């Protein structure tokens, strides 16, 4: 089964059309140690495609800086650069997008209804 659920922060340059949205999220994917032995969060930037009607709710949800939970399927894309290099990207084709917030008591993100 190809299903993914991922939490991330909506980045700038969201592209909204009538029946599709294309945007990037940054998702925390781990922690690494710096040379001074302190921890730093590792983030991965992921492109998301939402191939459904863009309602006012979705438009507001996809504002830069909002934390969202994305339900969808993992996919890929490839293209050739001007210099002839082939670039491969992983993308998420979203079925559902929900706003989330951090709950300090549980130390986890939860969906906002």
Image (spheres, rainbow, N blue to C red):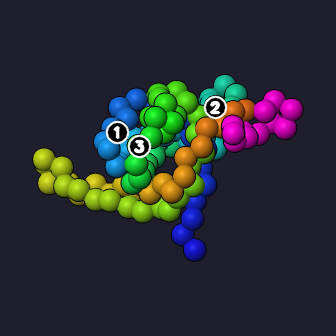
Residue 10, placed above or below residue 52: above
- Mark 1 vs mark 2: in front: 1
Label whose residue precedes the other's in the sequence (1 or 2): 1
Quick one: 77 or 54, which is closer to the camera?
54
Quick one: 87 or 25, which is closer to the camera?
25
- From the top left corner, tell me how far across and down residue 40 is, in percent: 64, 31
State the SS at label 1. strand
How many numbered circles are shown? 3
Residue of label 3: 54
Local crowd at mark 3 within 10 Å, few (<14), some, or many (≥20)? some
Residue name at image x 14 percent, y 54 percent: 84
Residue 83 relative to residue 98: left or right: left
Residue range corresponding to the magenta coloring:
103-113
Residue 55, placed above or below residue 13: below
Residue name at image x 80 percent, y 36 percent: 107
- From the top left corner, tell me how far across and down residue 101 is, in percent: 69, 33
Label ID, residue 40: 2
State the SS at label 2. strand
Residue of label 1: 16
């Amino acid at each position: 089964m190809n299903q993914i659920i991922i939490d991330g922060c909506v980045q700038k340059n969201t592209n909204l059309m009538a029946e599709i949205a294309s945007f990037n999220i940054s998702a925390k994917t781990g922690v690494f140690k710096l040379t001074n032995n302190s921890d730093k969060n590792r983030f991965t930037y992921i492109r998301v495609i939402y191939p459904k009607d863009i309602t006012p709710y979705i438009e507001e949800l996809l504002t830069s800086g909002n934390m969202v939970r994305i339900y969808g399927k993992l996919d890929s894309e490839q293209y050739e650069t001007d210099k002839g290099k082939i670039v491969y990207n992983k993308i998420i084709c979203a079925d559902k997008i929900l706003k989330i917030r951090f709950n300090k008591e549980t130390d986890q993100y939860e969906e906002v209804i």
